[in-house]
């Protein structure tokens, strides 16, 4: 037993060391074959593995943002990153046992030799951002592999609209820089940049310069929600529907919208699962025409973030309306299948011909379901223009249920009045229950919206913890890092032992001589 206990951790360590050694050899081999023939140094972030870079300089941009320039070991080396990419920085926040890994988007030219620049906004209590802000020139930072974002192809679109909020400007700026520096790329760019106050207009100098240098290809609008200056030269307000309507002057054909900002801004622009109609859909953009850089993907529950677009009122959807006939047939299919099952079971119990009973029941329920839905949808659409209140919906469901159920029951040889009463009651109760659940869900939308299984797993009575993919990835990364740390410790110990051995040998050698 004790042997097993001792050998297992050792085996894991050996496997870890062997794994890393293998990984190291693999990476080295990859790099050396690729660059053996050319004189160019290997790209800094190509392949797998970690890269440690020295911080060359820092620059405070405003009250919460810093620019950090890291130098490559070889001054003519390039990043090897493609448009668009981010880097995973491994930070060691104070008081934290485990490293924290967060992505950051380079803002320097991705092909620039010798250096790479990040711009980091510090969040209150932010682990990684706080650590990065505490770094001094000369300190080093380790990066895990790079993360590929949307891979830009030149001239894929005639116009790209770029909507950035606060620190979400970094991936958008990387795009602007990469597109404009390519003489073969003719894509026009319009940036809408929303911030809290004038001092949050990050990279303003660079953006102004691009607008002067490329007047036909790049223009921008800055919008400041809480200007500090009395006569602020910028538009005041959020990125809202009115602003975007006046910005999107051209047709939406062959255009793409790139978005990066806090969650509330993203939600208002592209909608949410609960309320799928966002500003962009109302302005005629289809879902696949917009791309969101999930900059703050870990902030699912955050609903309001300062300096972002506000949720604006709902207007008519520009998405194709669901076809009433198709949806009625779908409802009919569901109720018909339920009827088949119910008819089958009750037929076995009550009828000498269970199959016929089941089919008859299936047809009856299909006809009831489909005609109920068709009637209900048309009344809601034509009479109430899809703006019925929950109460009106319940009345319409009762009416449609009664008419459809009564008529179908009569047609199938049953009695009209019981069919009418039963199905109108079913329609009313069904719709009222739906309304009640919907209201409850909306009330809880901004509080806890964890799925039932997750709540079970989070319960103090269950000895399990639910993990998202990100949590799991984080744990694996942390494990890899702790193995790496152990390897470093073992390396140190080996070094010490070797030193001891050499000094022992030397003293052993010198002793006889001394004698
Ligand atoms: C692909 C990608 C690229 C990114 N590039 C950059 C970049 O170039 N520059 C940059 O500064 N950041 C960038 N980020 C965000 C960055 O990775 C971190 O999420 C951010 O620095 C906060 O990490 P933290 O450990 O300091 O905060 P945490 O310790 O995780 O959180 C601390 C507090 O800050 C809040 N918070 C964290 N992130 C945000 C946010 N984005 N908006 C509002 N509140 C927040 C949290 O809710 C929490 O209350 C990028 C994110 C992604 C996914």
Image: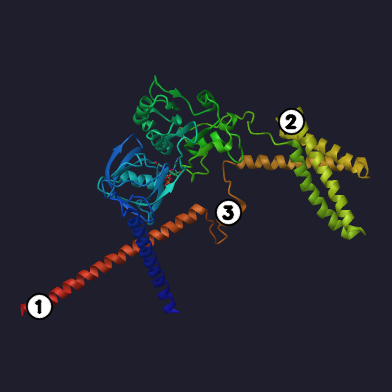
Q: Is residue 496 above or below residue 508?
A: above
Residue 121 point in image, percent of width and height: 38, 39
Residue 402 point in image, percent of width and height: 85, 38
Q: Is residue 164 left or right of residue 377?
A: left
Residue 270 point in image, percent of width and height: 55, 36
Which mark is first along the chain, 1 or 3?
3
Do the residues under discs 3 and 1 have CB atoms within 8 angstroms?
Answer: no
Camera-nearest label, 3 or 2: 2
Could you classify mark 3 by the number of other residues whose Cα lies within 10 Å: few (under 14), some (14-19), or many (20 or more)?
Answer: some
For the point 83% across and 47% down, the residue is 365
Q: Quadrant of residue 62?
A: top left
Q: Is residue 297 above or below residue 313?
A: below
**Image quadrant containing the C terminus:** bottom left
Q: Quadrant of ligand 1?
A: top left
Q: Quadrant of residue 233?
A: top left
For the point 86% across and 37% down, the residue is 403
Identify residue for label 2: 381
Q: Is residue 391 above or below residue 230?
A: below
Residue 351 point in image, percent of width and height: 92, 58
Q: CA distance from mark 1 to mark 2?
A: 103 Å
Camera-nearest label, 3 or 1: 1
Q: CA distance from mark 3 to mark 1?
A: 70 Å
Which mark is first along the chain, 2 or 1?
2
Disc number for residue 454? 3
Which mark is first along the chain, 2 or 3?
2
Identify residue for label 1: 511
For the point 81% across and 37% down, the residue is 398
Q: CA distance from mark 3 to mark 2?
A: 38 Å
Q: Is residue 233 left or right of residue 464?
A: left
Residue placed most toward the observer, 316 or 110: 110
**Image quadrant containing the N terminus:** bottom left
Q: Secondary structure at mark 2?
A: helix
């Amino acid at each position: 037993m004790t042997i097993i206990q001792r050998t297992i951790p050792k085996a894991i360590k050996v496997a870890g060391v062997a794994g890393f050694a293998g990984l190291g050899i693999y990476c080295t081999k990859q790099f050396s074959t690729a660059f053996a023939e050319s004189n160019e140094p290997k790209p800094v972030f190509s392949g797998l593995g970690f890269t440690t870079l020295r911080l060359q300089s820092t620059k405070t941009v405003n009250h919460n943002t810093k620019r950090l320039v890291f130098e490559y070991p070889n001054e003519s080396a390039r990043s090897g990153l493609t448009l668009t990419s981010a880097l995973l920085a491994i930070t060691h926040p104070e008081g934290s046992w485990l490293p924290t890994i967060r992505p950051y988007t380079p803002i320097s030219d991705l092909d620039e030799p010798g250096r790479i620049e990040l711009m980091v906004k510090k969040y209150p209590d932010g682990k990684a951002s706080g650590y990065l802000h505490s770094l001094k020139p000369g300190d080093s930072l380790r990066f895990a592999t790079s993360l590929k974002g949307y891979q830009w192809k030149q001239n894929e679109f005639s116009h790209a609209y770029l909507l950035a909020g606060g620190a979400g400007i970094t991936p958008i700026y990387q795009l602007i820089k990469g597109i404009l520096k390519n003489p073969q790329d003719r894509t026009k760019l319009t940036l809408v940049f929303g911030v809290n106050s004038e001092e949050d207009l990050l990279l303003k100098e660079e953006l102004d310069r691009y607008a002067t240098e490329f007047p036909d290809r790049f223009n921008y609008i800055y919008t400041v929600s809480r200007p500090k200056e009395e006569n602020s030269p910028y538009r005041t307000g959020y990125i809202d529907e009115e602003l975007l309507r006046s910005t999107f002057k051209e047709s939406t054909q062959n255009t793409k919208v790139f978005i990066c900002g806090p969650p509330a801004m993203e939600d208002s622009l592209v909608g949410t699962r609960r309320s799928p109609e966002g500003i962009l859909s109302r302005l005629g953009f289809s879902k696949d025409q917009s791309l969101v850089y999930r900059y703050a993907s870990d902030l699912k529950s955050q609903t309001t973030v300062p300096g972002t677009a506000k949720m604006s009122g709902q207007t008519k959807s520009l998405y194709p309306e669901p076809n009433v006939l198709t949806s009625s047939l779908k409802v009919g299919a569901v109720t018909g299948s339920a009827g088949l099952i119910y008819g089958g079971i009750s037929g076995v119990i009550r009828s000498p011909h269970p199959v016929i009973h089941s089919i008859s029941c299936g047809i009856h329920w299909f006809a009831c379901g489909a005609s109920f839905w068709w009637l209900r949808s048309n009344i809601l659409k034509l009479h109430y223009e899809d703006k019925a209140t929950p109460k009106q919906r319940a009345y319409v469901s009762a009416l449609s249920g009664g008419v459809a159920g009564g008529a179908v029951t009569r047609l199938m040889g049953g009695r009209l009045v019981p069919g009418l009463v039963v199905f109108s009651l079913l329609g009313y109760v069904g719709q009222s229950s739906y309304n009640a659940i919907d209201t409850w869900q909306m009330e809880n939308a901004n509080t806890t919206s964890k799925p039932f299984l997750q709540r079970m797993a989070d319960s103090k009575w269950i000895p399990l913890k639910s993990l998202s993919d990100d949590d799991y990835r984080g744990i694996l990364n942390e494990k890899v890092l702790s193995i790496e740390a152990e390897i470093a410790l073992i390396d140190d110990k080996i070094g010490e032992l070797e030193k001891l051995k050499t000094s022992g040998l030397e003293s052993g050698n010198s002793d006889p001589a001394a004698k």
